Image: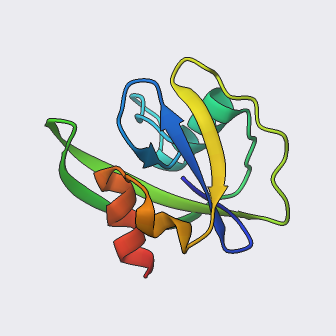
Amino acid sequence: MAVYVGSALLLVRSSYRRGWHLPGGGVRRGETPETAAQRELAEEIGLRATSLLAVGSASGTWDGRRDRVHFFELRLAELPELKLDNREVIEARLTSPADLQGMVLTRPLAAYLDRVR
């Protein structure tokens, strides 16, 4: 789930994974990818989103398993106060495009950035 405020992208850091990534998670049985993205945003960072823009998907082997990642975008005028779950997500920050160059990014995030560049 790519959340933008202007050109800044919201990235999160989790307790169990090295590097920065987009908020998100798994799709439950019977759930659409969009519904899963909305649920994960609410669970992980307390952000409610009603309409998301689907921007594609990517498949790969990440964190030792084969997976398919669905990408959605949400563009906001300002970032509301976030409520991190402090279990999975322990840090969140808006990141400028220039700052992304020096950061450790997860492979799914790198795949998303490759798509939108």
Residue found at the far bottom of this picture: 117
Q: Residue at x 45, y 48 (%)?
A: 21
Side (left or right) of 107 relative to 10:
left
Q: Quadrant of residue 115?
A: bottom left
Does the image show residue 56?
no
Residue 71 rendering spot, x and y as whole percentages: 45, 59
**What colouring style does the render use?**
rainbow
37 w.r.t. 3: above or below: above
Side (left or right) of 75 relative to 98:
right
Residue 104 rendering spot, x and y as whole percentages: 37, 52
20 w.r.t. 63: above or below: below
Image quadrant holding the C terminus, namely bottom left
Side (left or right) of 19 relative to 82:
left
The foreground one among 80 and 51 is 80
54 w.r.t. 12: above or below: below
Residue found at the far top of this picture: 87
Q: Residue at x 84, y 66 (%)?
A: 77
Q: Residue at x 81, y 53 (%)?
A: 79
The foreground one among 9 and 102 is 102
The foreground one among 33 and 26 is 26
Residue 56 rendering spot, x and y as whole percentages: 40, 67
Residue 66 rendering spot, x and y as whole percentages: 15, 42
Does the image show residue 12?
yes
